[in-house]
Image (tube, helix red, strand yellow):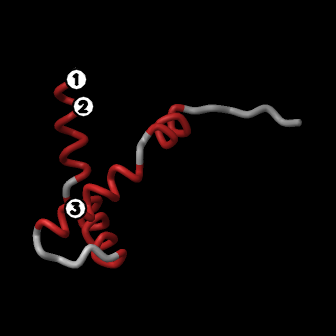
Amino acid sequence: MGKVTITPLTELAEWIDTSTIAEAILEELEEQGVPPTLENGQKVWLDFLETRLSEGLRSSVKAIC
């Protein structure tokens, strides 16, 4: 049997709660009067990843340093 390597990437990926993210996206869609569909949720998440995530990460890392 091979050795299992746990990396920070693996640990963080397992720690991140994707259900919480999905729930927040669907709730925001509903609050904005947009149908909470898979397609709309995907559009919101991809837009967030492309436009906001890197800025938010930079800001959060600076805040803990």
Mark toward the viewer: 3 or 1: 3
Ranked by sequence position, the earlier of labels 3 and 1 is 3
What is the CA distance from the residue labelled 2 to the residue labelled 3? 27 Å
Mark 2 and mark 1 residues within 8 Å of each other at the beta carbon:
yes
Residue positioned 28% across, 76% down in the render:
40
Task: Determine the image quadrant of residue 63.
Answer: top left
Q: Which residue is mark 3?
A: 27
**Disc ID at residue 61:** 2
Residue positioned 19% across, 47% down in the render:
55
What is the CA distance from the residue labelled 2 to the residue labelled 1? 5 Å
Whole-percent x and y of residue 11? Answer: 53, 34
Q: Is residue 54 left or right of residue 11?
A: left
Task: From this view, report whether residue 39 is shown above or below residue 57.
Answer: below
Q: What is the secondary structure assignment of the residue under circle 2? A: helix
Q: Of 43 and 17, which appears nearest the observer?
A: 17
Mark toward the viewer: 2 or 3: 3
